[in-house]
Amino acid sequence: MKLSITGLLLFFLIGCSEKTKVDDQSILEKTIAVHDSLDTWQTATLNLHIQEPRVSNPSRYSILKLDNENNTFELSRNRDEHISKHIIESNGNSSVLLDGKVETDTTLIQKYRLDASRSIGYKNFYKLLYGLPMSLEEAMKEVVSTSDILFNNENCYSIEIELKEAIISKFWNIYVSKNDMTLKGVDIVFPDDPEKGDRIYFDGTINIDGLKIPRIRHWHELKDDTYSGSDLIIKEIQE
């Protein structure tokens, strides 16, 4: 039986589409294998001291405690002369402390964003960003497209993804080195507003129980590459 030209074209397009999906998944699987060769992310614990200088706040730092196995989270951060702590327990209960106690002063609550409802946002952000690329398996809705690109003077794959829920934005671009399949950076994109968005350049790695986590993240404005701050994992906290 002879296939019509239309049938052949449809067969070709479907085949190309399926191949693209396979290639997209293959790239993600390879970079995950590089960063988590022992497949431990789902039960991993991160206890990190992170310096987070920003142009507007050069002295900012955070202490991150993320326990994937028990589903708990703590984020301590310096707030002027104070220390805030956002906590999520394994049962989902959340609380916020300022200098070790529950704050009742509404002025301080607003100034330092001590609303417990913000805790889940902090957890989702730090789990996604510090778990890349492994965290994409849980957070990602779909791969939109994959292409080749020169990113920060290195040949990379650009993986355009849509997240299930917005973490800053629902649309992220992930940059993976074609040379060694390591992560090189991220774009956080707002398709409807080109004036918004961030580009994060990754540099170096820290090895935590077999996980290779990008150690330094430099934040830039996506629209013009203006520097806005950095995240530096200073050390793993031993408990």
Image (cartoon, rainbow, N blue to C red):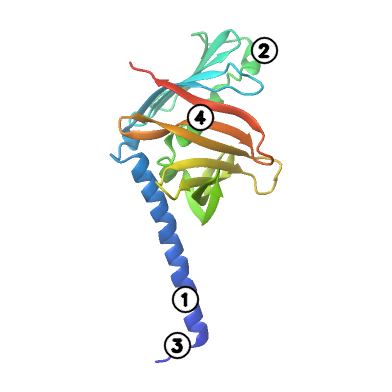
Other-residue count near label 2 (Cα within 10 Å), few / some / many at <14 / 14–19 / ≥20: few
Determine which residue is flagged by label 3. Answer: 3
Q: CA distance from mark 2 to mark 3?
A: 73 Å
Q: Are marks 2 and 1 in contact (CB under 8 Å)?
A: no
Q: According to the image, label 1 marks what residue? A: 12
Residue at the disc numbered 2: 107
**Badge 2 or badge 3: first in the primary sequence:** 3
Q: Quadrant of the C terminus?
A: top left
Amino acid marked by disc 1: Phe
Q: Are the two marked residues, 3 and 4, in contact with CB atoms closer than 8 angstroms?
A: no
Precedes in sequence: disc 1 or disc 3: 3
- Residue 193 position, x and y percent, is 70, 45
Q: CA gap, disc 3 to disc 4? A: 55 Å
Residue at horizontal 42 percent and vertical 65 percent from the top: 19
Residue 228 lies in quadrant:
top right
Residue nearer the viewer, 147 or 89: 147
The 10 Å Cα crowd at callout 1, few under 14, some 14 to 19, many 20 or more, is: few
Residue at screen point 50% across, 50% down: 155
Give the number of the disc on residue 120. Answer: 4
**Residue most toward the bottom?**
1
Q: Earlier in the sequence, mark 3 or mark 4?
A: 3
Q: Is residue 163 visible?
A: no
Residue at the front extreme, as displayed = 153
Q: Amino acid at mark 3?
A: Leu
